[in-house]
Image (cartoon, rainbow, N blue to C red):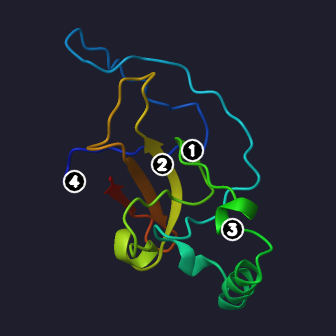
Amino acid sequence: MGDHWVIREYDDLENIVIKDLQSPVSYLKPFPLRSELYPKDAPVWDGGGIEDIDYRLISDIVKLEREGLFNSYYDIIKHNYRTKLGGYPSFCQPGIGFKDGFGEGFEFVFQVSSDDKANLNVIHSGSFMFAKNKETGEWSLYYDFY
């Protein structure tokens, strides 16, 4: 995405820069974000990020599925696809993973997802996902869509 993004980090709010981003021609609608704890966020089984699940756990889940104890991974695990801080990224494309999307050494931090209320459509119902490298302090932006 080049130089079209700016991420500012603050240790405290003393020197925070508040920028007026209102535009009379923008199709985006402002709306408040409400925080909500979503304790059961898990990687998307068939859309990437699954490498974060221990291989033995994957084997156990597949075994229980085959025994007919449930129909799908998503019967026992939930994933939050909305805008969020933390948790797991909502990869749309199968086979994409943390290393492929963000780069080696980066950890997922937050995502901004398509939202009807805000009139925001990330390409085709996708998300912007932001990750940070703890060692270098560098940020990485990855976007994914259907």
> Along the polypeptide, which appears first: circle 3 or circle 1?
3
**x, y percentage for residue 106?**
46, 71
Label 4 secondary element? loop
> Is the residue under label 2 in contact with that under label 3 (CB below 8 Å)?
no
Q: Which residue is mark 4?
A: 1
Under mark 1, the amino acid is Lys
Q: Residue at x 19, y 54 (%)?
A: 2
Q: Nearer the viewer, mark 4 or mark 2?
A: 2
Circle 4 crowding by C-alpha within 10 Å: few under 14, some 14–19, many from 20: few
Looking at the image, tell me whether mark 4 or mark 2 is earlier in sequence order: 4
Read off the residue under disc 1: 84
Labels 3, 2: front one: 3
Query: Sequence order check: which comes first, mark 3 or mark 4?
Result: 4
Q: Nearer the viewer, mark 3 or mark 1?
A: 3
Residue at (71%, 36%) from the top-left corner?
Answer: 36
Q: Are marks 1 and 4 in contact (CB under 8 Å)?
A: no
Which mark sits nearer the N-terminus, 3 or 2? Answer: 3
Distance from the alpha carbon under mark 3 to that under mark 1: 28 Å
Mark 3 secondary-structure assignment: loop
Gap between marks 4 and 2 measured at Cα: 15 Å
Is 18 drawn above or below residue 44 in the view shown?
above
Residue, x 65% and y 89% (percent of image)?
55
Rounded to the nearest whole Å, what is the CA distance between mark 3 and mark 4? 39 Å
User: Which residue, given by chain and number where applicable, does mark 2 sit on?
Assistant: 111
Q: Position of residue 110 (x, y in %)?
A: 52, 51
Query: How far apart, in angstroms, are the residues tagged by discs 1 and 4?
Result: 20 Å
